[in-house]
Amino acid sequence: MKPLDLLVVIAVPIIWGFGFTLAKGTFDAFPPIFLMSLRFSIAALILIWFVRPLWDRAGRLLLTTFVGGTVAYSLQFTGLSGMYASTAVLVVQGEVVFASLLAAIVFKDRLNRWQAGAMVIALVGIAFIAGDPKIQGDPWPFVMVALGGLSWAAGQVLIKSLGPVGGLRLIAWFAAFCGPQFLLTSLVFEEGQWQAVTAASWTDWSKVFYLAVIMTAGGYALWYRLVGIYRLNQIVPFLLLVPVTSIAGGILVLGEELSTNVAIGGAIVLAAVTFIHLSQARPPALRPGSGEAKPLLPPEA
């Protein structure tokens, strides 16, 4: 790998991981779902000019973005607003397990015993996290984050119905379709959107800029460039920097603390997900270099 590309493949997951932490720190200014509407609408306005339209698959894309985007991220980021970012990002790792299981069920992808074992171990780790006293006191944020991961995984399966689509083209129109969906969802379930827009400080808007322009538009443009150049097994392991960065950001920036349950469960989850990421037999719905439609978003981004 070229030195500049190596820097990029390290930087992009760090950008995504810090964005997860930054989103948590932005909820004081913007309701979570409304924040997602701003993020994806702005990203779409930047990206759609550089890719061909997907109008011939608009119906299927609408369903895919609703399940894998609007429902998934509405649940995940609403849940994130009620729990530590460092804990939520570990629960989000269940996306990898859910997506692999759904691919095995729907597409009959074979899972060897080591992969199946790693998935069971990851779920055990998530169960450890669920036993944390803070989560036991208010389990709904945990449940929403976990269900959001399941919805994200279902969206990955629905991508197969779109046929071959370039990665940047997919994320551009994913954002374009999701932006209005998030806004409508926010108007139904949240309040104070206009007040948030008028009262937000320049610091708050700079965070929105980071999430939309740097994390989403810039991050995915760079990521899919790497996908087109290098083998998947060269770049996918770097995705493990996402949860590591989010955990570090939660502790160092937001002042969060890892309880014993979360620390043990998180270590178990990360070890299991590491094995799944490094496995060569990845489900087709998750293989960016397979020639099929690229994944909407790498996990937890």
Image (cartoon, grey):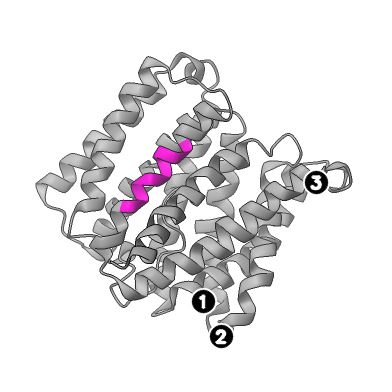
Where residue 258 appears, as percent x and y from the top left, is 44, 21
Q: Which corner quadrant of the image does residue 270 belong to?
A: top left
Number of the label disc, if any, that sits on residue 169: 1
Mark 1 is surrounded, within 10 Å at the Cα level, by few (under 14), some (14 to 19) or many (20 or more) other residues, namely: many
User: Front-most of 235 and 88?
Assistant: 235
Q: Which amino acid does label 2 sit on?
A: Arg
Asked whether 276 or 17 is in front, the reply is 17
Question: Please, is residue 250 above or below residue 44 in the view?
Answer: above
> Label 3 belongs to which residue?
202
**Disc 3 secondary structure class:** helix
Residue 121, located in which quarter of the rendered image?
top left
* Identity of the residue drawn at 55% across and 38% down: 21
Residue under the image location 52 percent in, 80 percent down: 57
Which residue appears at 16% of the width and 59% of the height?
A: 110
Looking at the image, residue 185 lies above or below residue 125: below
Magenta stretch holds residue 23: no
Q: In this view, does 65 lie above or below 125?
A: below
Q: Which residue is drawn at 34% across and 64% down?
A: 3
Q: In this rendering, would 299 be left or right of 120?
A: right
Prevailing secondary structure class for the magenta stretch in the rendered image: helix
Report the residue marked by disc 2. 52
Span shown in magenta: 238-246
Residue 237 shows up from this direction:
yes
Magenta stretch contains residue 243: yes
The numbered dot on residue 81 is none
What amino acid is at disc 3? Trp
| Residue 92 visible | no
Q: Quick one: label 2 or label 1, which is nearer the N terminus?
A: 2
Q: Is residue 211 left or right of residue 188?
A: left
Q: Distance between the residues labelled 3 and 2?
A: 34 Å
